């Protein structure tokens, strides 16, 4: 049985309810471009909202992380990955959490306890040593020498303030070498496979820490890493998760995996991620901003490595690989079946565009190749035309020219630092992105959606949103640029509703009843059978949503549209502020 099924069945047997996997593009968390962790879609409930499925939850969640994109190509990094999780929202705590984790690993997955070690929180000036976790692990048969105590690595907090607490990580001895009696956290042969986070404190702005009245448990286990461990391979891409895709790349390229590992891993990883982004209900297309930029970069990098394997780029190679990926995952994620043609068309269109870009790059190279290529020029070819440095070197060598590799690498490093700095807020994640101002903007998106339906027409539907502390961005279906009259009318309507001091009420009902009642919903498939519906005023706005929201529209202040523009075909974008 698949690891995902084993996990879900186990925790359902412990009284948990399985919740649907959320889309990879988050609807309610403005702090990130993608869902980066299994807990991310549950942020409102970890903050105190009541979950329709109760207090014990479990799922497998699609995640995307792009902060270490340059590491893809090694044996264990992935941009898209699946996280298994189980949560207690004020229900059970450490005893059940650690006991069940140990039971699942040793009795369901049959991992010998001799191959396990754990870390626990050592304590600091504010919070004591986690003696409870320590005693629990001893009682479960983990010897003292296999329990390591740390401070920084075993304490979790999302930002500067908010819910926080100790965690306990479980490690597996991933080597055929003799297992050492003592657990050394610096020994890379010990790999983390599970993390149990205990949110039992709250850190306040003055630095003080108090006990939370309602304590939560948040756990996470990576599907790819655990599968590789169970199958006894030290290269994740040699596990059963990846071998069907790698075998197809071998067949298409007519090359062996050995000697071509990096390019094959990158193609497999990047196309899998691109498939899930393209299939997402948010309708992301390759572009030069936000999620679309990441998608474009992934597809183009896969194409470059396909070229390195001498794959005919004009063939249907990407269609064959993407189809194989969708075949492997569609029984778990229905959007792959529903949006198969959208995925294949998106990949093909970007491939055609990039091929044209490469041709432009070749022409640009001819213009600058009358002398040795300096670092700035080499980086320009890479950044603007997608030329990998290896291609620039190869072309230069044919002309008897040298390339300033050190200068290129310096510019590349500078570019990386700028990218990291610029995207720090986009990838921070956690509970920090749901403060007072974000909550106001979230409610404002509901009012704007309702206003646009009245001003533009009932066929207007939300296609996405992004919120920061400075502004809100709202994407909606519309086939024309809004006139000044339409923008002014929508803005005036939102401000009218704010001035009317309308209550924002949360209702709980079956999903089918919510839809029948006319409630708006962006991602219907992500919602559970029992849903939260937020109603503003006397039905001015009625939407399925996970929150958070203000209690009354008077809290919003003054609403102002600052920009209206195209987002993609058939989708317009409004940027607005509250002042």
Image (spheres, rainbow, N blue to C red):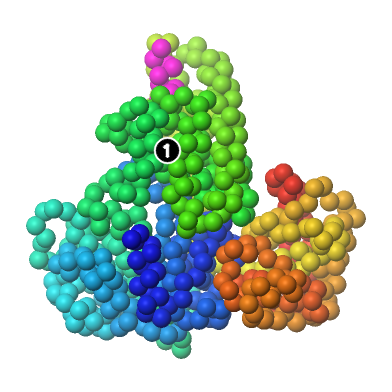
In the rendered view of the protein, which quadrant contains the C terminus?
A: bottom right
Q: In the image, is 268 to the left or to the right of 540?
A: left
Query: What kind of secondary structure does the magenta stretch mostly adopt?
Result: helix
* Residue 263 seen by the camera: no
Q: Residue at x 17, y 74 (%)?
A: 142
What's the residue at 39%, 34% (across, down)? Answer: 249
Horizontal side of 550 relative to 400 (left or right) equals right
Q: Quadrant of residue 539?
A: bottom right
Query: x and y percent of residue 284 in the render?
Result: 61, 48
The residue that mark 1 highlights is 267
Element under label 1? helix
Badge 1 local density, few (<14 within 10 Å), some, or many (20+)?
many
User: Which region shows up in magenta?
Assistant: 390-398
- Residue 579 vertical placement versus 16 (above, below): above
**x and y, in percent, of residue 40 in the image:** 49, 66
Does the segment drawn in magenta span residue 395?
Answer: yes
> Which residue is located at x 39 percent, y 41 percent?
245
Q: Check if residue 86 falls in the magenta segment.
A: no
Which residue occupies the foreground of this view, 252 or 36?
A: 252
Residue at the farthest right position: 485
Measured from the top left, where is residue 476 in percent x and y?
73, 55
Q: Is residue 312 above or below residue 486?
A: above
Say above or below: 152 vs 539: above
- Would residue 190 be found to the left or right of residue 277 on screen? left
Q: Quadrant where the N terminus lies? A: bottom left
Residue at x 61% of width, y 75% of height: 531
Closer-to-camera residue (496/367): 496
């Amino acid at each position: 049985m698949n690891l995902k099924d084993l996990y879900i069945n186990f925790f359902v047997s412990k009284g948990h309810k399985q919740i649907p996997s959320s889309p990879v593009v988050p609807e309610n968390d403005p702090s990130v471009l993608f869902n980066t962790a299994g807990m991310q879609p549950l942020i409102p409930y970890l903050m105190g909202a009541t979950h329709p499925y109760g207090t014990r939850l479990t799922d497998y969640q699609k995640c995307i992380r792009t902060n270490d994109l340059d590491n893809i190509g090694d044996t264990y990094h992935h941009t898209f990955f699946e996280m298994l999780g189980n949560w207690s929202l004020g229900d059970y705590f450490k005893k059940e959490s650690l006991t069940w984790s140990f039971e699942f690993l040793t009795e369901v997955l049959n991992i010998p306890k001799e191959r396990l070690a754990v870390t626990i929180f050592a304590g600091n000036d504010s919070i004591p040593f986690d003696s409870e976790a320590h005693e629990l692990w001893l009682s479960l048969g983990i010897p003292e020498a296999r329990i390591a105590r740390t401070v920084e690595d075993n304490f979790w907090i999302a930002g500067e303030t908010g819910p926080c607490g100790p965690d306990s990580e479980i490690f597996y001895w991933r080597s055929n070498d003799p297992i050492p009696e003592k657990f050394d956290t610096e020994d890379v042969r010990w790999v983390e496979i599970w993390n149990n986070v205990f949110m039992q404190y709250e850190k306040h702005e003055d630095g003080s820490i108090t006990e939370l009245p309602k304590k939560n448990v948040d756990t996470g286990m990576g599907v790819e890493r655990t599968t590789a461990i169970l199958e006894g391979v030290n290269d994740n891409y040699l596990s059963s998760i990846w071998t069907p895709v790698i075998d197809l790349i071998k067949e298409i390229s007519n090359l062996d995996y050995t000697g071509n590992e990096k390019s094959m891993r990158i193609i497999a990883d990047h196309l899998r991620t691109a498939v899930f982004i393209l299939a997402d209900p948010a309708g992301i297309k390759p572009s030069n901003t936000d999620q679309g930029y990441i998608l474009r970069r992934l597809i183009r990098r896969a194409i470059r490595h396909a070229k390195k394997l001498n794959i005919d780029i004009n063939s249907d190679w990407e269609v064959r690989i993407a189809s194989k990926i969708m075949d492997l995952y569609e029984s778990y994620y229905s959007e792959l079946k529903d949006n198969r043609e959208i995925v294949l068309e998106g990949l093909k269109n970007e491939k055609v565009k990039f091929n044209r870009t490469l041709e432009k790059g070749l022409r640009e190279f001819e213009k600058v190749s009358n002398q040795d290529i300096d670092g700035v020029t080499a980086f320009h070819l890479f950044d603007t035309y997608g030329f990998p440095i290896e291609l620039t070197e190869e072309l230069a060598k044919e002309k008897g020219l040298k390339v300033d590799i050190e200068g290129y690498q310096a510019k590349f490093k500078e570019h990386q630092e700028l990218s990291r700095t610029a995207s720090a807020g986009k990838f921070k994640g956690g509970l920090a992105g749901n403060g007072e101002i974000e909550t106001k903007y979230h409610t404002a998106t509901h009012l704007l959606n309702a206003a646009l339906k009245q001003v533009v027409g009932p066929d207007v539907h939300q296609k996405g949103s992004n919120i920061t502390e400075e502004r809100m961005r709202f994407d909606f279906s519309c086939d024309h640029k809004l006139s000044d009259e339409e923008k002014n009318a929508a803005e005036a309507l939102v401000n009218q509703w704010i001035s009317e001091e309308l209550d924002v009420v949360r209702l709980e009902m079956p999903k089918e009843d919510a839809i029948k009642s006319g409630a708006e919903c962006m991602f219907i498939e992500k919602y559970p059978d029992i849903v939260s519906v937020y109603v503003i005023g006397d039905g001015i706005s009625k939407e399925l949503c996970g929150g958070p929201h203000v209690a009354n529209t008077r809290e919003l202040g003054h609403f102002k549209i600052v920009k209206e523009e195209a987002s993609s075909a058939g989708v317009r974008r409004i940027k607005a502020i509250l002042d």
